[in-house]
Structure formats: structure tokens, C-alpha cells
Image (cartoon, grey):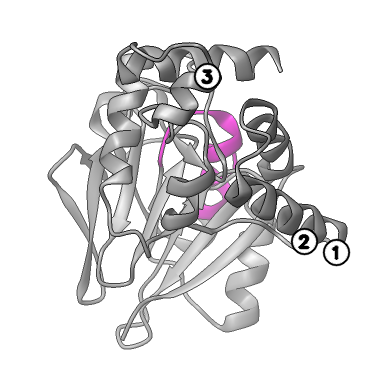
Amino acid sequence: MPLELVTIPCLADNYAFLLHDAESGQTACIDVPEAAPILAALDARGWALTDILLTHHHNDHIGGVAELRTRTGALVAGAAADAHRLPPLDLALSEGMSVPLGREFGQVIDVPGHTVGHIAFHFPESGVVFTGDSLMAMGCGRLFEGTPAQMWDSLSKLSALPPETLVCSGHEYTASNARFALSLEPDELAIKSRASAIEQARAKGQPTVPSRLSDELATNPFLRASNPRMKAAVGMDRAQDAAVFGEIRARKDRF
């Protein structure tokens, strides 16, 4: 039985996620922008939080950890490389390690770029990956600490996951990301169609996260850096993929 996923809006535009194993009763929270909405979601379902999994150190992803840990007694796991700037960790993680939840194991993937210690959690049996601010719906995080080459490598790892994987990213930025994608490739039908669907969803107050990896592969400009049509769109037909990605990211920073 796949794990049950709950998406929780937090702060102005953040998301936290609950992942629940019905058989064991174990429940993990991935990122904690603030505690109150997460506690409310747990109470509404009668779930007891057992684990807190952190993707990176930015305060809008860890700001509620202290309160949530105090209220629930949950164990906290995060990147060993970032232990010095994360809340105190009960489990320090690196790529190749896994975190158990019931009978399933979440695989730890290093995805530096947004920050140098950023990690993602992939639960293959349930078909879900928690990407924080690395791969986002129609976007990716700003390169606050890493290089374009690092982020391109990280996105390439995530792109190689099964296309039906649900991508649980950290923010509701999809509408602005879609406008940027259209500015680069205004005639791509898949992008136009998705942008329209996003606009309709947001007009109804509906979230656009999580998203399907297959949709990201087709429409996310940052995953299309290797596509000849994208290379032509940015005037870099003969450039290396990572360089094209860097140009797209720089354009988004100015958009």
C-alpha cells in the first residue's frame, strides 16, 4: 500500500508535506516552514508525527522545527553537510542513505545548487520525491550557493526518476514560472496548455503542487536545457547543456 500524502500550505507561499504509513502509524513531515498548519493537519487526521525530514537550511523550510519537535517528540533528519546550520539532527544524512517509514524507505539524493547542502527524498514505492527548492513546478531554485553545473547535475539526477513520479516542491511559484517559460518558448503547445491550466487552478485557489515529473520534463524550461529547441530559443545551439541551463537561470533571475 503506498504511503498517504498530504500537502499543507504554509506562510505566504510555502508547502510542507505529510507522508503517512497506515499500517505502522508512522508519519513524516517534510520541511517545516511553521508548526501550526502542520499540527492542525495531524490533529484533523488523528496522526502522530514520528519523523521530520529537512531538505535544506533556509528558515522558510525549518522555522517551525523547534515547536513541532517539542509538541510531537518527532526525530529530525537532515543533511550531514549542513548539520552546522540546521536544527539539531537525530539523523545526519548523505547520498546513498535511506530513511524508513513503515515498510518503505526514502532514498536520500544530493541536489546542491540552491544551497550546497540541499538534499531530496525519493520514496520509490509510493512514487513521490520531495525536492524542496531544487526542482520546482515549472522552475528551480535560485543559485544562492551552488553553480549552474552543480544545479544542472542535480536536476539531471531528478529527471532520471520514473516519469510518473510526483514532485513535491517547496513553493507555489508555478504561475510566474509558467510566464517565464512562455517568454522563452511561446509556441510550445505543451507549455501553453500547462500555463492555461495553472492559471485556471490558481484562479480557483487550487494548488499546483505536487506536479508530475513527466509534465516537468515536457514544460519546465530548466529541464529543457538539453533540448535543441530550447538551445535555439536562447541562441546557444552549440553550447553545453550546463551552460544553457546557466543562461536560462540568469534570465529567470532578471525576469
Q: Residues within 10 Å of mark 1 (few under 14, many from 20)?
A: few
Asked if the residue under mark 1 is in contact with the one under mark 2, i.e. CB atoms within 8 Å, the reply is: yes
Return the x and y of residue 123 as percentages of the image width and height.
29, 62
Q: Residues within 10 Å of mark 3 (few under 14, many from 20)?
A: many
In the foreground, 241 or 121: 241
Residue in view at x 53 percent, y 18 percent: 249
Asked if the residue under mark 1 is in contact with the one under mark 3, i.e. CB atoms within 8 Å, the reply is: no
Which residue is under mark 2?
201
Region of the chain picked out in magenta, as a range: 55-69
Q: Is residue 147 visible?
A: no
Q: Nearer the viewer, mark 2 or mark 3?
A: 3
Q: Is residue 216 visible?
A: yes
Q: Seen in the image, is 155 located left or right of residue 193?
A: left
* SS for callout 2: helix
Which residue is under mark 3?
248
* SS for callout 3: helix
- Residue 46 against residue 81 in the figure, above or below: below
First in sequence: mark 2 vs mark 3: 2
- Residue 70 against residue 128 in the figure, above or below: above
Return the x and y of residue 135 as percentages of the image width and height.
45, 39
Return the x and y of residue 248 as percentages of the image width and height.
52, 19
Quarter of the image where the C terminus is located? top right
Which residue is under mark 1?
204
- For the image, the number of numbered tags is 3
- Residue 167 against residue 206 in the figure, above or below: above
> Which amino acid type is marked by label 3?
Ile
> Which amino acid type is marked by label 2?
Ala
- Quarter assignment of residue 204: bottom right
> Which amino acid type is marked by label 1?
Lys
First in sequence: mark 3 vs mark 1: 1
